[in-house]
Image: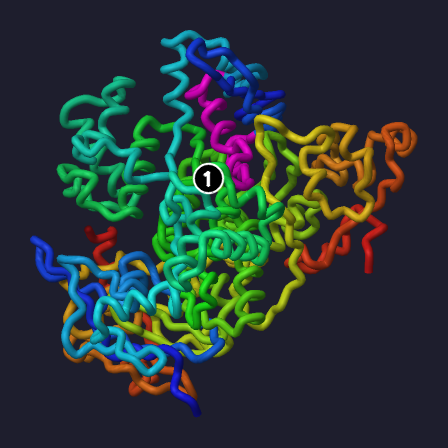
Amino acid sequence: MTLLSVRDLTKHFPIKRGVFGQVSGQVRAVDGVSFDIAAGETLALVGESGCGKSTTGRVVLRLIEPTSGSVQFDGNDVFALGAGDLRRLRRKMQIVFQDPFSSLNPRMSIGAIVREGLTIHKLAEGAAADARVRELLEEVGLRPEYASRYPHEFSGGQRQRVGIARALSVEPTFIVCDEPVSALDVSVQAQVVNLLQDLQRDRGLAYLFIAHDLSVVEHIANRVAVMYLGHIVELAAVNDLYGTPIMPYTQALLSAVPAPDPGVKRERILLAGDVPSPANPPSGCVFHPRCQHPARDAACAAIVPPLEEKAPGHWAACIKQPPTAASWEAQKAAGGTNSPEFFLPRAALHRSVDSTSAHQSLPA
Amino acid sequence: MTAPLLEIENLRTWFYTDSGVARSVDGVSLHVDHGETLGVVGESGCGKSVTALSILRLIRAPGRIEAGSAIRFEGKDLLTLAERDIQHVRGNRIAMVFQEPMTALNPVFTVGDQIAEVARIHAGMSRRDAWEKAVEMLRLVGIPAPEQRAHEYPHQLSGGMRQRVVIAMALVMNPALVIADEPTTALDVTIQAQILELLADLTKRFGTSILLITHDLGVVAENCARVIVMYAGQVVEEATTAELFSHPHHPYTEGLLGAMPRVGGNAERLATIPGTVPSPTAWPDGCRFRERCMYAWERCAKEHPPLYQIGAGHVSRCHLAVEPERRSQPHLPVAAQQGVTAA
């Protein structure tokens, strides 16, 4: 069952210049993003810094107002709701922030932090609320006695647990996890990842898991969406995305992850240069200036690639990876000289390619 | 066999704070050979950065390098050098690459000026020669259009470009040793791959040794021949990279390897190390890892383990070296038995 449905979401931030604040341009942070999340599912949103993944997470919860697009949550149009209805709906959709140091009020005890949501949404009062806070702390692996302590008395991993308990207090069905483990050490990171998985199993939560660490994502996600410069460039089930990444950007991203295995020397796809500025994105395919697809040509700079289903459930935005709706004639008309050809470099493959894959033209 | 380039012996760097003495680095010994890349891994608070700063004597009060520590570099004991002489070593023979390139660079000078400054101070070059040197260094680290880029300020460059500038600055004097403290932690994976490739290429060309400090075992696996694992201010294991990843001995190393999610790994659940690193003002007696360890027994509480020799070039600070049969009896660590994470 679809819980959250995002369609053509855009968020442009105006660039203001001079004393009169004249708008001189737009930062296209999120530029036409669509995805669905089913109840109890984890969709991961991955990409490099500045690709718009955090903005997407916040716009979905309407913590930032969108420029255009729509978000349906559990039958409600999130962008059409008034303040009161929105607050009631927020009970069902919560967020866990990246930085456990700045996301907790240092003047409130952790008990008060977790309790605040209960009070605001009138879920429990007095002794019942105290009992609920103790239960929640226990559920996230903190001692109930700690309720009277303050955030500075806790380590990063423990603070992140408090942030999770706070999100859980109002019994949401959907949580946006905005880089929840990026600030944590490896051993603590594993504890928090396991906790999130346990909570999902026990409570049937759906997560939008925003992260830049591909190895963590592979552990927690059911499906993965790769973002680049405000666009989703590939969206697939986790095994398909890691096994047969179709978009050249995803291939490069996967090959760049250092493998903790000194025996294996992998061929690495090194991307030249940096991510272009979202205030002035490249024409056509936003990735074309850095792309290493063998068939890349002038058509890539002219045609905006649609997000197409290249294999069942596997969506990618590349006109050079067949099957593509941008026909060879259309590409030639746009200055293309290389016809689309399927390209899957060995370097990007961490697993053997599934033999049942829908593509016949895999290179040997 | 020639003497190693850098040899640290029993380094102890303690901080005298109001809440007690923080023994951040507590008896670290290690060496870096000529042309070698040595990895130092560990979690935050294990003392790896303080070790790096101690090498260059960049420890400020209330921190102090305790008597009895020795840092030998190219035949000199850095800890007994006069301030003048240590300044000659800094930047000239040993250079440092910091984690956060934005704070390592001065925002009010152009990057060209900042690189040229190193050449003027350490090599006594003229302004013009130093500027040319700066442009040449920017080209060397792969910055496109270095003549123009040299006139830009740090805020005009991306994170990856800034880190290249910091590396260019470190390499101006062609140092014998580069200390890289989490050089890629603030960068995206694709940029991290570029920077690590650059460092590896430069060491190959100039024979520079690198002390690579990181928390990412993947980075170590791909870039270092030898690794040191630190925990609670001490070296707990040292081995070649291949040996450490295939036969980790110390339970902490084992835990770190298990806790690391890996691309292509199929374990549904990540192994964890319960609990957290203890406070440096109160390291536990005996083995400092014992409360989080699944093999710990009475001996671990009574006796602080020495570094046992496990094999050629492989040492481990764990009593399992002398009682290996204990490895077949794992149990729930103390930190996990409390059922909840301790504060």
Does residue B333 appear in this view? no
Note whether A197 is above or below B36 in the view shown: above
Residue depicted at x 14% and y 24%: A126
Residue depicted at x 47% and y 61%: B172
Residue A41 forms part of the magenta stretch: yes
Q: Is residue B276 left or right of residue A338?
A: left
Q: Is residue B216 left or right of residue A168?
A: right
Give the magenta part as a residue range.
A37-65
Note whether B105 is above or below A92 in the view shown: below
Element marked by disc 1: loop
Q: Amino acid at mark 1?
A: Tyr
Work out whether residue A39 or residue A315 is closer to the camera in this orientation and state it.
A315
Residue A7 pos. (x, y %): 61, 21
Residue B127 pos. (x, y %): 45, 52
Residue B221 pos. (x, y %): 51, 67
Work out whether residue A296 or residue A108 is closer to the camera in this orientation and state it.
A296
Residue depicted at x 68% and y 38%: A287
Numbered-mark total: 1
Q: Quadrant of the N terminus of chain B?
A: bottom left
Note whether A179 is above or below B285 in the view shown: above
Residue depicted at x 46% and y 46%: B111
* Mark 1 burial class by Cα count in 10 Å: few <14, some 14-19, many 20+: some
Does residue A139 appear in this view? yes
Q: Residue B123 sits in which quadrant?
A: bottom left
Q: Which residue is mark 1?
A: B153
Name the chain letter of the residue that bears numbered label 1.
B
Q: Is residue A157 left or right of residue A196?
A: left
Note whether A14 is above or below B144 in the view shown: above
